[in-house]
Amino acid sequence: MSDSFGRGSLTAARPANPDPVRVMVVDDSAVIRGLLTRALEGDPDIRVVTSVGDGQMAVNSLQRNSIDVIVLDIEMPVMDGLTAIPKLLAVAPQVKIIMASTLTLRGADVSIRCLSAGAADYIPKPTSTREIGGAEDFKRELVAKVKALGAAARRAGSRSRGEIRPLTPSAAPSLFKREVGPIVTRPAAAGVPVKPDVIAIGSSTGGPQALFEVLSHLKGISQPILITQHMPATFTTILAEHISRQCGIDAREAKDGEPVVQNRCYIAPGDFHMLVAQRAGVNVIALSKDPPENFCRPAVDPMMRSILKAFGGRKILSCILTGMGQDGLKGCTEVVNGGGTLIAQDEASSVVWGMPGAVAQAGICNVILPLKEIGPHIRKLASRAA
């Protein structure tokens, strides 16, 4: 018999994985912990090892249990999520933490601070137990992120021990599987990259931390920077504010119809594709409610296609940072075929090597770099003589 999460039907369809992703659920509500546990264990590739009610209990439990992923509430008694993150990572540096946050300005602000402190990702938490129990999109997103980050945690732990211990293949969500082949890079058009007129960046899981690192090197460059980070509304407003404060650049959530000008960074607002259109000969932001692409809105692919059309090929510098899935592959392929330049983050420095791995495997990147080298490389290209 199946419960409201479909657990019975899922486990009947496929036997439990002998090496599942090991999860800890941390929330001060016993009801929420139970709902999250049932949602997760409805997938045979996930096992909730323990669930606790505050950050201090989580730290204590992590010292006794082997955990891959922690789903961590933000607001809790005794020790909140933000305080707990560095303590949890001190106990288990390889563990991946997903913040469960409500879609409020305060929730978004604290979530971005948690990501800066070392959390790998966040998930917008429904505001009621009824919504958690019945929100299929929420459960699918939670399960997908836990599985992808579980695989990343195993890889990180194996690298630190000099071992290779990947997850059992069935534990990698099929949505994000791809064949792995040799990585080749592509020479720049005409032999060397040209000075770009615009910089376009796409990112998802682990993206806020990566964006802070990359953009910290770009203060003072003249080119407009356009960023699509997979995030819900409210979160993108706060992300732009944090980028401005931490990186010293003029970052704003994009508004429909505003001109694309130099010395400004535009963040795609949650639930809108951010495009560039030409109106009266001027490049302006065009926000779109077109259907999601790659299960995402905002998505990277439509941004890249529109920038290619507005700016032409050779003057575009594109970059794909850490993230699940393969959003950006089709759009960046068009940019590169049009003569633009593409940088991808390498696997070792990515939280999840889905999006950058997709463009790397496609052989369309001009260079694949560790995160800390991407900002300086973009600055070098942006500052070269025309």
Image (cartoon, rainbow, N blue to C red):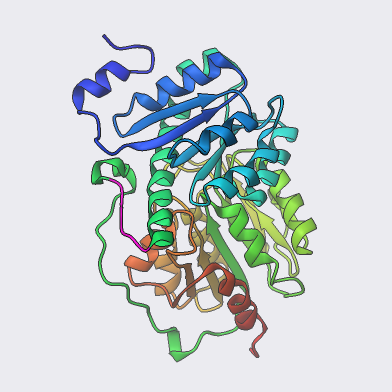
Position of 264 with respect to 168 (left or right) is: right
Position of 212 with respect to 329 (left or right) is: right
User: Magenta span has 164?
Assistant: yes
Residue 6 falls in which quadrant of the image?
Answer: top left
Q: Residue at x 41, y 34 (%)?
A: 143
Quarter the N terminus occupies: top left
Q: Residue at x 60, y 69 (%)?
A: 199
Tell me: residue 308, above or below residue 47. below
Q: Residue at x 34, y 48 (%)?
A: 176
Q: Residue at x 25, y 34 (%)?
A: 17
The main secondary structure of the magenta stretch is: loop
Tell me: residue 167, above or below residue 106. below
Can see residue 282?
Answer: no
Q: Nearer the viewer, residue 308 or 213?
A: 213
User: Magenta span has 382?
Assistant: no
Q: Nearer the viewer, residue 258 or 15?
A: 15
Provide residue 120's location: percent of width, then percent of height.
Answer: 54, 47
Q: Nearer the viewer, residue 130 or 314?
A: 130
Provide residue 329's location: percent of width, then percent of height.
Answer: 40, 60
Provide residue 87's location: percent of width, then percent of height.
Answer: 63, 44
Provide residue 16's location: percent of width, then percent of height.
Answer: 24, 29
Residues shaded magenta? 162-167
Can see residue 266?
Answer: yes
Quarter the C terminus occupies: bottom right
Tell me: residue 55, above or below residue 194. above
Position of 251 with respect to 345 (left or right) is: right
